[in-house]
Image (spheres, grey):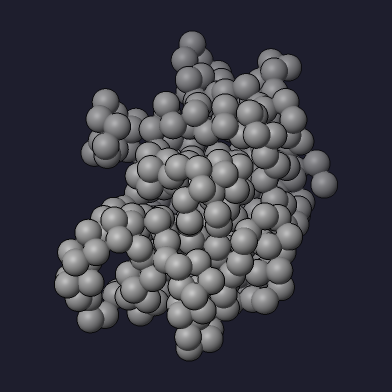
């Protein structure tokens, strides 16, 4: 089978011929119809991820066929019995086990779920990691309720855009931020009530004037702008963070948090139960993940370049059939 192999930090992936995987009693070989990239994949290629092993087939997202059945792959592995946090043995598909940037993949049979019937292969492949992370952030950690005001930062990326779609479907009033006016316009065309360009100095003041303050904020950036999120969070608000692409938060003032009774919590991925709940939510509301662009497996490095540039609006797909 063909697979995109990561062998060395800061080097392009190589297209390799690997032996076809073989099933056992508890495992299944899935013929992949599509896979999707995540920021995690890029971080691994740059050495910005713990316990990297090489050579490895990257990729956490995928959908395909197993014995003629259309399936979507749950990238969770060994979450454990406590829904509050993963076990010490927890891993995500694509590191340290071979992932979905290949024609076939071997996974445990309990990682396979029926593909939502209304999704095409590209949409199904775009869903697992972003959908699970967004669902847990919004509902389990964020406690989102209908008509609440929600801010989602960095719209355009997979998790943020999926979270926006989920929040709109749940009846929330959703605002977004981006460094791209074009992405803001696209988000509002999809149901966001408003947005702000975080490159502008007073972006947070503009959002607070429009919204009156937020009940829930979903953030993946951290960095200096996190302090502005605290300023525009309403009394009793929750701020849920699932990433830190902009690094440390400077001059963190606890008074801003306890006077407004704000809750700040972290999240990453989610349980198998939440994965199933997410699939049911997507089916109930007939949500279609947004696809930015699809690349053949032979052009996987071009796909990584697009991910690195952060120009995408939606998920970047790898389609072995292209």
The answer to whether residue 126 is seen in the rendering is yes
Q: Residue at x 67, y 69 (%)?
A: 183
Above or below: residue 192 compared with residue 119: below
Which residue is depicted at the point 48% across and 61% down? 151
Residue 123 in the figure: left or right of residue 26: right
In the shown orientation, is residue 28 left or right of residue 255? Answer: right
Name the residue nearer the viewer: 23 or 172: 172
Is 35 or 260 nearer to us in this picture?
260
Q: For the N terminus, give its image quadrant.
A: top right
Q: Is residue 126 left or right of residue 43?
A: right
The answer to which image quadrant residue 82 occupies is top left
- Give the residue displayed 23% in from the left and 81% down from the top: 251
Residue furthest toward the bottom? 201
- Tell me if residue 5 comes above or below residue 97 in the rendering: below
Task: Where is residue 125? Give x, y as percent.
Answer: 65, 40
Does the image show residue 106?
A: no
Q: Nearer the viewer, residue 237 or 42?
A: 237
- Which residue is rendered at x = 41% and y = 55% of the image? 216
Q: Is residue 202 left or right of residue 61?
A: left
Q: Name the spot of residue 55 as percent of width and height, x first.
A: 48, 50
Q: Residue furthest top?
A: 25
């Amino acid at each position: 089978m063909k697979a995109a192999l990561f062998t060395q930090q800061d080097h392009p992936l190589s297209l390799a011929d690997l032996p076809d995987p073989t099933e056992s009693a508890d495992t299944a070989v899935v013929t992949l119809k599509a896979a999707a990239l995540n920021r995690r994949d890029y971080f691994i290629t740059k050495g910005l991820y713990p316990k990297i092993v090489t050579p490895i087939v990257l990729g956490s997202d995928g959908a395909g066929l197993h014995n003629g059945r259309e399936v979507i792959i749950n990238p969770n592995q060994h979450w454990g019995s406590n829904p509050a946090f993963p076990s010490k043995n927890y891993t995500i598909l694509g590191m340290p086990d071979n992932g979905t940037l290949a024609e076939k993949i071997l996974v445990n049979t309990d990682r396979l779920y029926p593909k939502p019937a209304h999704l095409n292969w590209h949409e199904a492949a775009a869903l697992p990691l972003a959908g699970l992370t967004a669902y847990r952030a919004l509902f389990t950690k964020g406690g989102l309720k209908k008509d609440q005001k929600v801010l989602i930062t960095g719209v355009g990326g997979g998790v943020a855009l999926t979270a926006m779609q989920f929040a709109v479907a749940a009846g929330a009033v959703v605002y977004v931020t981006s460094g791209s006016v074009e992405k803001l316009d696209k988000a509002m065309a999809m149901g966001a009530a408003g947005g702000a360009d975080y490159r502008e100095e007073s972006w947070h003041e503009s959002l607070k004037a429009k919204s009156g303050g937020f009940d829930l904020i979903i953030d993946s950036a951290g960095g200096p702008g996190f302090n502005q999120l605290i300023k525009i969070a309403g009394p009793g608000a929750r701020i849920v963070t699932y990433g830190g692409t902009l690094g440390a938060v400077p001059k963190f003032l606890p008074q801003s948090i306890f006077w407004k009774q704000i809750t700040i919590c972290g999240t990453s991925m989610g349980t198998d139960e939440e994965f199933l709940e997410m699939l049911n939510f997507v089916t109930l509301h007939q949500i279609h993940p947004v696809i930015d662009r699809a690349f053949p497996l032979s052009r996987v490095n071009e796909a990584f370049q697009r991910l690195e540039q952060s120009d995408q609006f939606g998920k970047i797909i790898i389609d072995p059939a292209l």
